[in-house]
Image: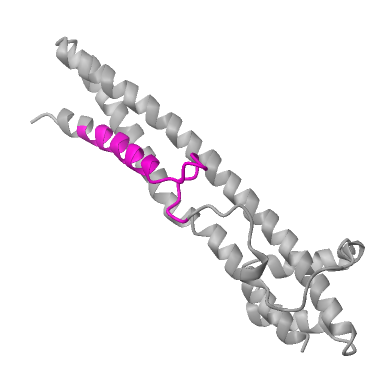
Amino acid sequence: MSLLPFRVLAASLAIGLVATQAHALDPRYPDWPCQQLKVPQISLASVWSGPSLDGVDKARIDDPKLADLVAHLAERRTPMEEAQKLIGEFVAGTAAEKPEKAKILFVALYDALNAQRDQVMDAIERFSRKQKTVAEDIRREVQKLHELQDANSDAAEIDGLAKRLEWETRIFEDRRKSTTYVCEVPVIIEKRLFDLGRAIQQAAQ
């Protein structure tokens, strides 16, 4: 039995999945493929319950040493135990100094991780746009395949197109499945910022 119907079915199913996924998206963000709602920026209230961040000296955030510390703390591979130790060392000082140092460190972390999250979300949307383009290419090739079949065209030409569709569909599906992990990354970044914010608040007490 020819495998041709199965190849055609696979391609058709891939296109159907894209259409179903597209209808599930927030219309404000047509290129956002994740089940999680897209939130453009991390809400401060969701990651910080410490003293007001108004009046933080932005000039101090540009300190190279602070930038190095923030980069190290923001790395997800940095264990929280190590992060807590580094935070404690930075925040150390008098009762008046500790809250100010804590706010400066948190604002720097917020800026860095929010920017990192923006980059990830931009990459996800670029990936989504590319997938839509591939889906349209597959759709056109499926239509061409049906036309060749209806016209009883050369069997070798039909089989060649069917094999190419099978391969393109497999790649498309593998990439589509990878979005499940990729879509978790913005959430992981926000959780990292929440954990660091809590550690900073504890160190400032």
Q: Position of residue 58 (x, y in %)?
A: 88, 62
Q: Position of residue 191 (x, y in %)?
A: 58, 69
- The residue shown at (76%, 71%) is 106
Q: Position of residue 110 (x, y in %)?
A: 72, 64
Q: Quadrant of residue 7?
A: top left
Quarter of the image that includes the C terminus: bottom right
- The residue shown at (76%, 79%) is 87
Task: Work out whether 98 lies above or below 163.
Answer: below
Q: Position of residue 198 (x, y in %)?
A: 66, 79
Q: Quadrant of residue 76?
A: bottom right
Q: Which residues are magenta?
A: 9-36
Task: Work out whether 156 lies above or below 192.
Answer: above
The number of numbered badges drawn on the structure is 0
Protein image colouring: one colour
Task: Work out whether 142 lies above or below 67.
Answer: above
31 inside magenta stretch: yes
User: Is residue 77 visible in the rendered structure shown here?
Assistant: no
Q: Quadrant of residue 203?
A: bottom right
| Residue furthest left as drawn | 1
- The residue shown at (68%, 61%) is 113
Relative to 147, 51 lies left or right: right
Task: Work out whether 100 lies above or below 10.
Answer: below
145 inside magenta stretch: no
Relative to 185, 68 lies left or right: right
